[in-house]
Amino acid sequence: KQEVTQIPAALSVPEGENLVLNCSFTDSAIYNLQWFRQDPGKGLTSLLLIQSSQREQTSGRLNASLDKSSGRSTLYIAASQPGDSATYLCAVQGGANNLFFGTGTRLTVIP
Amino acid sequence: GAGVSQSPSNKVTEKGKDVELRCDPISGHTALYWYRQSLGQGLEFLIYFQGNSAPDKSGLPSDRFSAERTGGSVSTLTIQRTQQEDSAVYLCASSATSGLREQFFGPGTRLTVL
């Protein structure tokens, strides 16, 4: 069974700092990988999706990379802002159709 | 609709009662998923629909849980004889079944079993 791990579990940074969130998965036979954001009491907002054939995707200040062979993905956030404070979830989709989620990284950006 | 919608947003029920949770997927999305997020735990998969059929029910935790989908659109997750451990946020997602297959999530239903 696919297992997804996210490190660190929590992270606090001062506003303006660049940061990296890490995700690792045990089965490299994936179809795609998604990064989500979850605000307290809210649903999930899709941030970036990387197909298995891709190495990275960028959206604004966000950049996600994928190294399928080593089972790793990173989410890079540039010039962090207080509005970036949320829980960030990594999820992989394999041969089965459902997503396997990590337990998330809770990010706090301090003004 | 513009996005995935779920109702109710909050549901408080007494132990032993049955509850129904509703999901309206994005128009045209043939794939629909139910997940559960329990306090202090990650998101776990419950069931997957392709059209009106459910080829993967492997995540349903017990036979008290069932789901159906009609008209290739709306889905209902039913929990019978609710228990306190059923308290969680139930999230629905939908996707296309080709191309990126990106999953889009609804806001969830927070279920509290007293």
Image: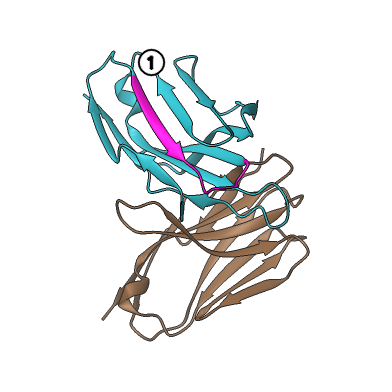
- Locate the C terminus of chain A and report the quarter of the image it occupies: bottom left
> Can residue A82 be seen from the camera position used here?
yes
Q: Nearer the viewer, residue B28 or B101?
A: B28
Q: In the displayed structure, does residue A49 sit left or right of residue B17?
A: right
Question: Which residue: 57% across, 39% down?
Answer: B32
> Can residue B61 be seen from the camera position used here?
no
Question: Which residue: 54% across, 61% down?
Answer: A35
Picture coordinates of residue A62, whole percent (x, y)? 52, 76
Picture coordinates of residue A97, whole percent (x, y)? 67, 41
Picture coordinates of residue A47, whole percent (x, y)? 51, 65
Q: In the displayed structure, does residue A72 sit left or right of residue B62?
A: right
What subunit carries mark 1?
B
Looking at the picture, which amino acid does disc 1 mark? Gln
Q: Is residue B49 above or below residue B30?
A: above
Quarter occupied by residue A100 = top right
Span colored in magenta: B19-30
Picture coordinates of residue B112, whole percent (x, y)? 26, 31
Q: Is residue B1 above or below residue A107?
A: above
Q: In the displayed structure, does residue A67 sit left or right of residue B54?
A: right
Mark 1 Cα-neighbour bin, 10 Å: few <14, some 14–19, many ≥20: some
Q: Which chain is brown?
A: A
Q: Nearer the viewer, residue B71 or A70?
A: B71
Q: Colour of chain B?
A: cyan
Q: In the displayed structure, does residue B71 sit left or right of residue A87?
A: right
Quarter occupied by residue B85 = top left
Q: Is residue B13 above or below residue A20?
A: above
Q: Which residue is mark 1?
A: B80
Instruction: Say whether residue B25 is magenta.
Output: yes
- Locate the N terminus of chain A and report the quarter of the image it occupies: top right
